[in-house]
Amino acid sequence: MAEHKRENFSSKLGIIMATAGSALGLGNIYRFPCEAGANGGGAFLIVYLVVALLIGTPLMISEFVIGRRSKSNPVGAFRRLAGKKTVWPAVGFLGVLCAFLILAFYTTVAGWTLGYLGKSVAGHFSGQNLEQIQSQFVSFTNHPWLPIVCQLLFLILTAFVVARGVKDGIERYSKILMPLLLVIMVVLCVKSLTLNGAADGLKFFFNPDFSKLNGRVLIGALGQSFFSLSIGMGALITYGSYISKDDNMTTSAVSVVLADTFVAVLAGVIIFPAAFTFGIQPEAGASLAFTTLPMVFQQMTGGYFFCLIFFLLLVIATLTSTISLLEVIVAAMTEELKITRTKAAVIGSLVTAVIGVFATLSFREGSALHISGRTVFDLLDHITASYFMPIGGLLIVLFVGWRMKRADLLDEMTNGGRLKVGVNKVIAFIIRYIAPVAIAVIFVSQLVG
Ligand code: PHE
């Protein structure tokens, strides 16, 4: 039986960076513009901001509370806090299952980022016009084996870091790379704002057309905020279990939510002006980021260099997210099945690869891998963001708000009374009353249209 010793993050900065590492990723740079583009731009943005700040923050804190109080993986956490003979550990299982499903399709696009890093090193974009860059995207995603090889490579990289553990793996990489990504995005943003279509792009992104609001937009924004903040499926219960007893979890969570939201908005400010300048439809979906960005680099002096760094950082931002997904699986397997980290990382990524390959293949034109009108990729994305995460999130706030004693919740948020109660009371109130109602209302509104 493998001896299992739990690690902790070593500092507050480490906690924030690792959590931000999980949160920041393709959700911000790839998925957010796709969703905003498909759901009318400004109206989506406003709902997104409200949901991310108002529901996202308390939910993130709830997950930290469950994690730190139980010092356990999501399955063990509910068992420890609620008792073996309850149904609550099922919420943890749901989270682990969700981690598999997300990782499976997430690594499809993660693989593309690796492929695009290769393309930028080889200078494939220089001197290319829009049609050529668009057709590069089509031929890359339709290539018979390249996207699969990239996906598998990405999974191997992820497993490698996760196998190394919390402090030396996850924390060390996140600390250096997250700030770098932010800097390069700000540079890109400044460039995008000087393009011809900047005004139109910004208008699309910031002008809310509330006639576009419907149940689909609401659940889209809810799912996107959960996805982007890595909440509702146990990743932050797992990371919460590595937070030390002295950290102020409220301020850590607020910092991460603000950083994540900032980067999502930044991505919109980069991508929409560029899309309008080059005549790309904002609802172009998958190709949006992968065609607009190389086009922006074309317009810049030193474009080759910036393009290369950008895709390098995107790979890394994506990697810190896949790490947190695999960590959910690995923490659960090492603690529940008593196997080593390395074994768990290998088994977890193998199972993911088996599902993930179908997601990648389903992207090819004319692929038969469609289920009820959606590609396997879309289906996995849709069921996790629109069902698993909202339901998981709802159960988590219900657990923390109603099953846990209020005194225990406040005790955990204030580090046993050492921190001021102040705002934590408001957060406890949101967790108990507002968040569950809001999530339930949005969830039901999608079902009725
Ligand atoms: N938050 C990550 C992103 O935005 C994706 C993710 C979801 C990671 C769920 C972990 C858990 O890219």
Image: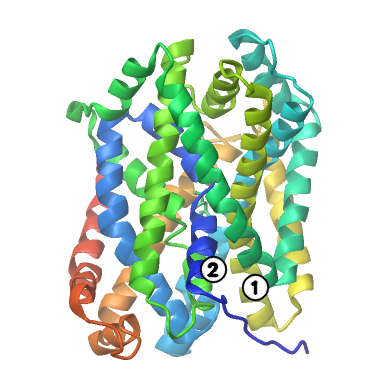
Vertical placement of residue 397 versus 37, above or below: below
Residue occupying the point 31% across, 38% down:
216
- The disc labelled 1 sits on which kind of residue? Lys
Q: Earlier in the sequence, mark 2 or mark 1?
A: 2
Q: Position of residue 17 (x, y in %)?
A: 52, 61
**Label 2 crowd (10 A; few <14 / some 14-19 / many >=20):** many
Q: Quadrant of the C terminus?
A: top left
Residue hosting label 1: 167
Look at the picture and state if 249 lies above or below 280: below
Residue 282 visible, this orientation? no
Residue 440 seen: yes
Q: Are marks 2 and 1 in contact (CB under 8 Å)?
A: yes
Quarter-of-image position of residue 342: bottom right
Q: Which residue in the structure is indicated by mark 2?
A: 14
Count neighbours of disc 1 (C-alpha within 10 A) and say few if under 14, some if 14 to 19, many if 20 or more.
some
Which residue is nearer to you in this view: 383 or 48? 48
Find numbered disc 2 in the image and state the secondary structure of the residue it sits on.
Answer: helix
Image position of 309 (left or right of 180): right
- The N terminus appears in which quarter of the rendering? bottom right
| Residue occupying image coordinates x 77% and y 47% | 152
